[in-house]
Image (spheres, coloured by chain):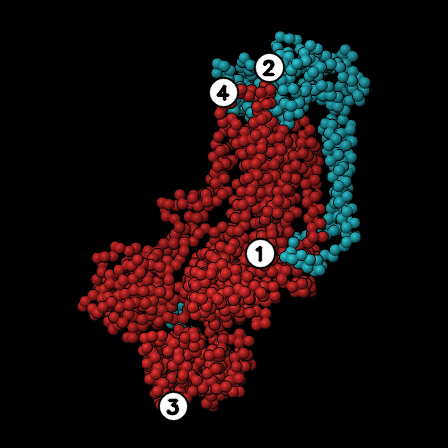
Chain colours: A cyan, B red
């Protein structure tokens, strides 16, 4: 075919060197990445590999499970529920309970005794536990303003704090919001054989919160001044960073049943010791039928008493062992050769699986 | 219906559009609204906009609105920018075409103007090799006989030259007169039929003011054809701009959506339904909680009287909380990985065509997955399967095979000797080769002779004859001069009995001017020549030769002759003249007369011509067919050639296995009957191991599609291969549309302008680039240099793309479901108030950062090596049938996300939190559990690990801690010191470890069980491929080691029969 296409002929025969150069430049640049040829590890699931993985997991998990179960067993926990016990005998109806607790003038002190079941070494943590209290409710959890808590110049910053933003006459509340407003205010004092046990109420909150989230120069203002009194009051002479109960309270709990640290007892308690607790039963959990408990607990390297972790480790470790055993049996009974063409799926069921 | 074109009359030109062509989708003004409308056509985008709008309402927004708006705006502007960029290039291409200089007659003189300024009625002056700028009616040429040659490959794909004639009324006008010509052309309004043009012309005085003369398609020069071997030609513009026949046949390209995208859209719609369901249930429960409980919880200070819409607030909060079930990152991630696939295609060295110096190019980067799901490949023939270069290879003359040893008759010493010794048979044979044709020898400047032919076969024969010293050196109407060993021999050409597809042969009657011997020289297909020749050993030997050559894939032409007596010729000539002039049924009568002369021929021999297939075409086609892809050949070419090429290229299996069903007929009823018969045979043989192919031509197809579309559709779905010849561009597109309407994934591949519509219509359009016309390549989604690259494009790139996207899409949905299930579980313990466990930052980072980066690593994942895929094309079935993303795989991922959400949340709550921790801690424990779990999930589902993937998975996990440790240092954030506290506690790490073990243990067990005891084909191949190599090394499998395995497998595949891979199974599913 001898086309008289002169232009085509010219480019073809023309500058061969230039064409060569262009040729080189148009070719895709070779690299292992662009050619998708990067060295790759291509593992196969061999029975050996899988069975040993399950065995190893079992071997590791069961001891861990035992260890954490032991740790949990070492923790001594004394729990005393006092919400109903601390009511006067004549109060039984729910409305009466609410009326009793919200009456500001009644003396609500109450005395409880608990028996220590096992030796408890210091530090012993004192928690209060609330039930059915939704600190994580959307309305509640958002009702705060962190800027205001941190900086004294931001006292007017009360956005998000609805409905506890300002007092009736429009002054900003510090700390604003529902969380602070509903501060827990039961108090406890402990004595053993008539001798007071001192409870260390310092450093019960996170250090990071004290140092950076709650200002050391921010003082409570217009707090609990309204007609509606929620929970506890704050000493307006103490800066927020030292109001540790508030700081603890404002770490909103994740779940409706929660414990919050109230203090630390820094003496050892012995088995069969009887501890007398004088408490002020101020906080209203009666309207929503929430329980109140006082908890004394030691701690292990894993934290508080919690068998779940150990049990879970044990059962998963066991499960892995069982799987490893099962696969070994299967392997022994029905061995499959790797890459045996007779197992090609199209031999058995049409069109692959 | 009609338009009147006033020739050369400036006064009435404003009527029609100018010659500006525009392929752009947008203009500056309509870009924003149109692009937005296009983007919002997708369900996902509508959904995101709705969510983003709802986020603006602070009463219900769980986290800050910026977490939704910022990514949304970024995503939309990226898409818009991409579109604008593409459109800008289209605009530049248009501009280049529009501003080409052309010569136009203005006021009687030639003027250079830009192509876009041509108006209907202008006289356009073309020089040799010029491209025709718009549709013209030819008025004059440099040729005294009023003909010119054009090449129309851009229009119909045929590279043969076509003869166009000046209408008789204008014949003989000088170029000066032509510049002053005036008149009217009455022509129909523009349509897209390149085969029909019914118009009239009338010239004004002083030109021959005879009456109206008809114009046909033969009088037109269509846009995008090229003027060849004619010094100049001029014509009047009748259709311009986008109204040209080419412009009208170019459908506007629709945005393409891959099958995978469609499924993803459907699945997201399903998730949306689930989400609505969850929202309704939780919203209802939340409202009940509010009514019964909230008032009791005094610390919430719940207002006694809510607003009228308070019933809506909680459901809407949950809606927003659950909105991450459909992740916004899905679209971004998929867009990004898709462009990565496109880059991989462009970078692929193995798809670089050395010859034309082109690499593959992906114009549309969004549809790589469709390549992996192709069910039908519709391919053009000319220039796509073949190189469209005919060469004379072998011949059989008088009982001797020439060229069988050397493979090239032109180099066969025996033949050269025979020529030298002037063997009479050989001389006759060569004479016939040189004379029996319609080739025009053209002397070019340097005395070299260039042959111009309408048929490439003839060109090849004349060239070969010239090589064998029998050169055709000049030819005019009646005299042809041959040059044999420097002696000129003159022949008078008495008659040319033209080729028709019915006769399948052509003949010339020549008279040797020296000896006055009159000869009939015939050449044609064996089935046309052999019956009209003497039967006898010669004829039988000839039939054998034809068989021999066909078997080796050559096109064969039988050449025969007969010496005519003067009287016989004279009486015949009389009849022929009468027949040629008859007005009724001329064609039949001429054929009848020809038949009388073409009898008792003496066979000279057989010429074998090679129409070279492109490199690797047969292998490619057979691989693709093994992969379960049905292949149709759609060509504008003749039926015989098409079938021949189909045979050569492995499209049709050889005789006993493959069978051809012709659908044809003279009348409409014949065609329909023939179709019914074909369908019946097809149904009967469907179960046998036979490969049926049907052959249909354009005319029959037109009738069928009009009358019996359903039957044809059934036939189309039954047959593995089909050959459709004589197709117009719109018919090609129509067939694509037909297959699309049956929900098949189609891929169209072609090289010429006649394939553009088919390419645009198909799900995936591929253009062969590197040849002259780049039209197809420009319109296509992908362009490749050679047909053979299609194999790699589909099997390697398409398959990987599909697998990867299927994994990535499901993984992304999984991780979003996971996090939203955790949120839902948490809302169960937060008084159904719609509190978000995770804060704004974690939520956004989870979607955008922590879980996206490992997903990106998966664009490098390969389940099987390229070699294995190429050796076992059958596994293409998995991606073709959509085995990796369908409701059942999705259900698996859904279950996995639910299980993992339960594992994470329950373990975090019971093991770590146990009453004492606050929300931020719980959130962080759950979040880090999720992140680690997902690193394992991806690891478990990754088939091979390159460093990049390992880095993406584990680097991401490390990055999670680094980011959180860094952010934990900023006191104003909610996450201040959270992760620092957690990291110090052994119980945190134990909890995380427990989550991973509980989450992945069952997955590993199930995967292992399937892998060993219920392996799929892919697993088996994987095992074969990998069992011979060490982990953590480059796995270039040595061919020696691999080969025996492959053989085993091959045997296994073969022995079990490929029928199990028969895509019909898919239909039966």
Give how far apart the Cα atoms at labels 3 and 2 are: 134 Å
Which tag, 4 or 2, sits closer to the chain's start? 4
Marks 2/1: CA distance?
76 Å
Kindly identify which chain the residue marked by label 2 belongs to.
A
Please identify, in this view, whether the residue under mark 4 or under mark 2 is nearer the observer. Answer: 2
Instruction: Report helix, strand or loop for mark 1.
Output: helix
Going from N to C along the chain, the mark reached first, 3 or 1, is 3
Q: Is residue A108 found left or right of B779 in the rendered image?
A: right
Image coords of residue A43 (percent x, y): 68, 52
Q: Nearer the viewer, residue B524 or A30?
A: B524
Task: Where is residue A196? Give x, y as percent.
Answer: 74, 13
Reading the image, the residue beneath label 4 is A156
Indicate the quadrant containing the N terminus of chain A: top left, top right, bottom left or bottom right.
bottom left
Left or right: A233 in relation to B489: right
Disc 1 + disc 4, Cβ < 8 Å? no
Indicate the quadrant where residue A90 lies: top right
Q: Give the vertical position of B215 relative to A217 (above or below).
A: below
Front-most of residues B835 and B682:
B682
Q: Residues within 10 Å of mark 4 (few under 14, many from 20)?
A: some
Count of all numbered marks drawn on residues in the image: 4
Residue at 43 percent across and 87 percent down: it is: B562
Residue B197 in view in this figure: yes
Per the image, the residue denoted by label 1 is: B1067
Q: Dot 2, how many residues are within 10 Å of its Cα: few (below 14), some (14-19), or many (20+)?
A: some
Where is residue B174 drawn, in percent x and y? 23, 71
Q: Which mark is residue B565?
A: 3
Disc 4 vs disc 3: Cβ atoms closer than 8 Å? no
Foreground mark, 1 or 4, reads 1
Residue in view at x 55 percent, y 66 percent: B681
């Amino acid at each position: 075919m001898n086309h008289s296409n002169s232009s085509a002929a010219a480019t073809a025969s023309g500058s061969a060197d230039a064409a060569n150069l262009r040729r080189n430049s148009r070719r895709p640049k070779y690299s292992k990445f662009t050619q998708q040829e990067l060295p790759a590890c291509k593992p196969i699931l061999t029975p050996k590999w899988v069975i040993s993985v399950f065995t190893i997991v079992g071997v590791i998990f069961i001891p861990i499970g035992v260890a954490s179960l032991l740790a949990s067993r070492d923790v001594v926990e004394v729990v005393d529920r006092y919400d109903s016990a601390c009511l006067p005998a004549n109060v039984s109806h729910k409305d009466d309970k609410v009326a009793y607790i919200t009456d500001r003038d009644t003396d609500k002190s109450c005395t409880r005794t608990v028996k220590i079941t096992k030796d408890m070494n210091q530090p012993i943590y004192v928690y209060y536990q609330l039930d059915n209290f939704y600190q994580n409710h959307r309305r509640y959890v958002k009702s705060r303003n962190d800027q205001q808590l941190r900086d004294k110049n931001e006292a007017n910053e009360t956005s998000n704090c609805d409905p506890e933003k300002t007092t009736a006459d429009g002054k900003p509340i510090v700390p604003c919001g529902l969380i602070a407003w509903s501060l827990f205010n039961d108090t406890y004092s402990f004595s053993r054989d008539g001798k007071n046990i001192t409870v260390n109420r310092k450093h019960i909150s996170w250090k990071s919160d004290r140092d950076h989230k709650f200002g050391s120069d921010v003082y409570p203002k217009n707090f609990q001044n309204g007609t509606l009194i929620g929970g506890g009051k704050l000493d307006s002479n103490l800066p927020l960073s030292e109001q540790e109960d508030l700081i603890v309270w404002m770490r909103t709990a994740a779940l409706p049943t929660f414990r919050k640290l109230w203090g630390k007892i820094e003496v050892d308690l012995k088995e069969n010791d009887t501890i007398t607790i004088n408490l002020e039963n101020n906080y209203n959990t009666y309207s929503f039928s929430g329980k109140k408990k006082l908890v004394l607990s030691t701690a292990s390297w894993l934290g508080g008493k919690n068998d779940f972790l150990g049990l879970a480790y044990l059962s998963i470790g066991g499960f892995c062992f069982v799987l490893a055993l099962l696969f070994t049996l299967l392997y022994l009974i029905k061995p499959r050769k790797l890459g045996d063409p007779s197992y090609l799926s199209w031999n058995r069921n049409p069109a692959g699986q | 219906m009609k338009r009147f074109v006033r020739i050369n009359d400036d006064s009435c030109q404003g009527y029609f559009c100018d010659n500006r062509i525009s392929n752009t989708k947008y203009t500056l003004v309509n870009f924003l609204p149109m692009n937005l409308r296009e983007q919002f056509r997708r369900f996902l985008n509508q959904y995101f906009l709705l969510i983003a709008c709802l986020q603006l309402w602070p009463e219900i927004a769980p986290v800050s609105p910026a977490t939704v708006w910022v990514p949304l705006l970024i995503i939309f502007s990226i898409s818009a920018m991409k579109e604008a960029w593409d459109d800008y290039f289209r605009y530049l291409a248009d501009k280049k075409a529009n501003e080409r200089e052309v010569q136009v007659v203005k006021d009687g003189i030639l003027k250079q103007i830009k192509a876009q300024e041509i108006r209907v009625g202008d006289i356009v002056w073309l020089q040799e090799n010029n491209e025709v700028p718009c549709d013209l009616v030819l008025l004059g040429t440099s040729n005294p006989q009023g003909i010119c040659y054009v090449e129309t490959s851009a229009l119909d794909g045929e590279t043969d030259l076509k003869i166009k004639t000046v209408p008789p009324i204008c014949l003989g006008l000088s170029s000066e007169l032509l510049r002053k010509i005036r008149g009217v052309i009455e022509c129909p309004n523009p349509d897209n039929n390149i085969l029909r043009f019914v118009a009239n012309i009338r010239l004004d005085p002083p030109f021959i003011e005879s009456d109206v003369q008809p114009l046909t398609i033969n009088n037109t020069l269509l846009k995008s054809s090229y003027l060849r071997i004619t010094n100049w030609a001029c014509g009047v513009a009748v259709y311009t701009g986008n109204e040209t026949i080419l412009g009208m046949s170019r459908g506007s390209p629709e945005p393409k959506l891959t099958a995978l995208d469609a499924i993803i859209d459907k699945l997201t719609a399903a998730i949306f339904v689930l989400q609505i369901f969850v929202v309704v249930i939780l919203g209802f429960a939340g409202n009940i909680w509010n009514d019964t409980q909230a008032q009791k919880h005094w610390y919430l200070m719940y207002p006694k009287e809510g607003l009228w819409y308070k019933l809506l607030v909680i459901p809407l909060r949950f809606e927003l909380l659950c909105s991450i079930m459909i992740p916004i990152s899905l679209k971004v991630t998929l867009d990004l990985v898709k462009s990565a696939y496109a880059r991989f295609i462009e970078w692929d060295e193995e798809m670089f065509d050395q010859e034309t110096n082109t690499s593959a190019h992906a114009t549309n980067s969004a549809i790589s997955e469709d390549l992996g799901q192709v069910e039908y490949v519709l391919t053009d023939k000319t220039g796509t399967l073949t190189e469209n270069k005919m060469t004379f290879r072998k011949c059989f003359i008088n009982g001797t095979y020439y060229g069988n040893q050397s493979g090239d008759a032109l180099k066969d010493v025996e033949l050269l000797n025979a020529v030298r010794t002037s063997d009479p048979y050989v001389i006759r044979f060569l004479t016939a080769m040189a004379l029996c044709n319609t080739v025009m020898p053209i002397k070019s400047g340097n005395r070299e002779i260039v042959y111009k032919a309408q048929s490439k076969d003839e060109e090849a024969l004349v060239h070969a004859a010239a090589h064998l010293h029998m050169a055709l050196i000049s030819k005019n109407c009646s005299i042809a001069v041959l040059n044999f060993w420097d002696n000129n021999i003159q022949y008078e050409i008495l008659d040319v009995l033209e080729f028709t597809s019915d006769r399948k042969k052509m003949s010339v009657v020549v008279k040797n001017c020296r000896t006055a011997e009159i000869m009939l020289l015939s050449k044609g297909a064996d089935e046309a020549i052999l019956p009209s020749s003497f039967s006898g050993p010669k004829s039988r030997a000839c039939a054998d030769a034809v068989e021999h050559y066909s078997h080796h894939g050559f096109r064969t032409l039988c050449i025969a002759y007969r010496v005519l007596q003067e009287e016989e010729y004279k009486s015949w000539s009389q009849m022929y003249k009468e027949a040629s002039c008859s007005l009724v049924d001329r064609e039949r009568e001429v054929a009848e007369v020809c038949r009388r002369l073409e009898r008792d021929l003496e066979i000279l021999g057989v010429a074998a011509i090679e129409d070279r297939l492109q490199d690797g075409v047969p292998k490619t086609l057979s691989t693709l067919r093994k992969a379960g892809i049905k292949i149709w050949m759609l060509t504008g070419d003749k039926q015989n050639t098409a079938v021949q090429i189909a045979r050569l290229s492995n499209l049709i299996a050889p005789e006993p296995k493959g069978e051809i069903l012709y659908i044809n007929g003279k009348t409409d009823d014949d065609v329909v009957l023939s179709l019914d018969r074909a369908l019946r045979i097809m149904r009967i043989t469907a179960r046998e191991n036979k490969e049926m192919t049907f052959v249909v031509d354009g005319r029959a197809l037109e009738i069928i599609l009009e009358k019996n579309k359903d039957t044809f559709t059934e036939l189309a779905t039954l047959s593995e291969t089909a050959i459709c010849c004589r197709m117009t561009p719109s018919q090609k597109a129509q067939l694509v549309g037909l297959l699309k309407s049956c929900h098949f994934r189609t891929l169209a591949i072609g090289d010429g302008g006649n394939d553009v519509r088919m390419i645009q219509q198909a799900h995936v359009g591929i253009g062969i680039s590197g040849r002259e016309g780049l039209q197809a390549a420009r319109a296509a989604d992908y362009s490749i240099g050679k047909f053979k690259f299609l194999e790699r494009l589909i099997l390697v790139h398409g398959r990987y793309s599909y697998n990867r996207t299927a994994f990535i899409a499901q993984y992304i949905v999984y991780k979003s479901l996971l996090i939203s299930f955790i949120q839902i579980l948490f809302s169960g313990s937060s008084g159904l108030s719609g509190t978000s466990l995770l804060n704004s930052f974690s939520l956004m980072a989870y979607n955008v950062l922590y879980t996206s980066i490992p997903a990106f690593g998966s664009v490098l994942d390969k389940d099987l090596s390229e070699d294995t895929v190429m050796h076992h094309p059958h596994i293409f079935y998995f991606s073709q049938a959509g085995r990796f993303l369908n409701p059942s795989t999705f259900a698996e991922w859904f279950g996995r996300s639910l299980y993992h959400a339960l594992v994470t949340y329950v373990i975090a709550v019971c093991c770590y939190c146990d009453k004492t921790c606050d929300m931020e801690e719980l959130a962080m424990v759950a979040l880090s559990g999720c992140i680690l779990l997902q690193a394992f999930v991806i690891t478990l589902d990754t088939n091979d690990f390159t460093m990049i993937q390992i880095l993406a998975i584990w680097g991401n996990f490390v990055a999670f801690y680094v980011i959180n440790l860094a952010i934990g240092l900023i006191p104003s954030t909610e996450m201040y010191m959270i992760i620092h506290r957690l990291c110090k506690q052994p119980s945190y790490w134990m909890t995380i470890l427990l989550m991973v073990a509980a989450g992945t243990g069952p997955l590993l067990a199930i995967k292992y069980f399937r892998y060993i005891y219920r392996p799929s084909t892919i697993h088996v191949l994987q095992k074969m491929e990998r069992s011979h190599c060490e982990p953590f090394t480059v796995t270039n499998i040595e061919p020696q080691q691999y080969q025996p395995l492959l053989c085993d497998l091959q045997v296994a595949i073969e022995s079990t029969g490929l029928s199990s891979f028969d895509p019909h199974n898919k239909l039966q599913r």
